[in-house]
Amino acid sequence: MFNQLIESQPKKQKMAGGTLFSIILHSVLIVFAVIATANAGINKDDKKAEKINFVEMKKEPPKPKNEPPPPPKDVVMKAPPPKGFQVLRAPVDIPIKIPEIDLSKKVTNEDDFSGKGVKGGIAKGVAGGTGIVDPNQTYFEFQVEKPVVQVPGTASPRYPEVLRSSGVEGEVQAQFVVGEEGRADVSTLKILKSSNDLFSSAVRNALPNMRFYAAEVGGKKVKQLVQQTFQFRLDR
């Protein structure tokens, strides 16, 4: 029995030594495992931290096509003035003072007012040419081929009742411009002479509703300065 006890001590010592070695070995393995796990986590985080940015490349707009140059404009040559004479324009606004002489203006050629040839031409114009009708020009009655005529049956000035009941008669001489459309331009109306202001008011009120056949020059309608007398007479 003593021998058995003596032999059991070495076994216990061996077991104790093996256990210690096992503990150390496992500790080393655990340390390596922890380090490996930590490195793996860092690498994974590093991989996650890597971010790829895709940059969208903008496409350059197509270059504009070279447009062909525009065709040259047609050159319109003005017709030379015909051989003829100038006409005087009707003064819508009659000046009350003599205008000052402007020496810088071109001297008027008397030959341009000879009355020979085509209206609107000049003495040195082209023979056989045609005159040009200016739509902005206002003509006198003697300058037009067809003068202004009032359309029959259109509005006429109403006789003022006060003057009618009093037996007063009279007349009004008015001046105004009739346009190409056959209407009187009320802004140009001027009362040249009147026997009573009530007669003048009657003419002024009726003029916008009056209709006329427009004047014509060369087959084209033009403006004409009209001087017309309106008479107010009572039937007795």
Image: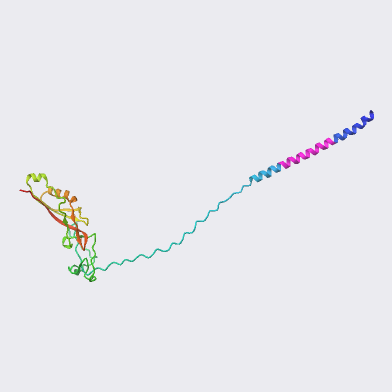
Determine whether 146 is above or below 40 in the image: below
Q: Residue at x 80, y 39 (%)?
A: 25
Q: Is residue 105 magenta?
A: no
Residue drawn at the location 94% of the way across and 28% of the way down:
2
Span shown in magenta: 18-37
Q: Residue furthest left?
A: 236
Picture residue at 87% right of the left edge, 35% below the top: 14
- State the quadrant of the N terminus: top right
Answer yes or no: is residue 95 visible: no
Residue 162 in view (yes/no): yes
Residue 128 lies, in percent from the top left, at 23, 70
Residue 144 place in picture, x, y as percent? 18, 62
Q: How is the image coloured?
A: rainbow
Q: Is residue 28 magenta?
A: yes
Image quadrant in which you'd find residue 226: bottom left
Compared with residue 234, is residue 180 higher up or lower down, i.e. above or below? below
The image shows residue 230 at horizontal and vertical percentages of 12, 52
Judging depth in this view, the residue of 15 and 93 nearest the camera is: 15
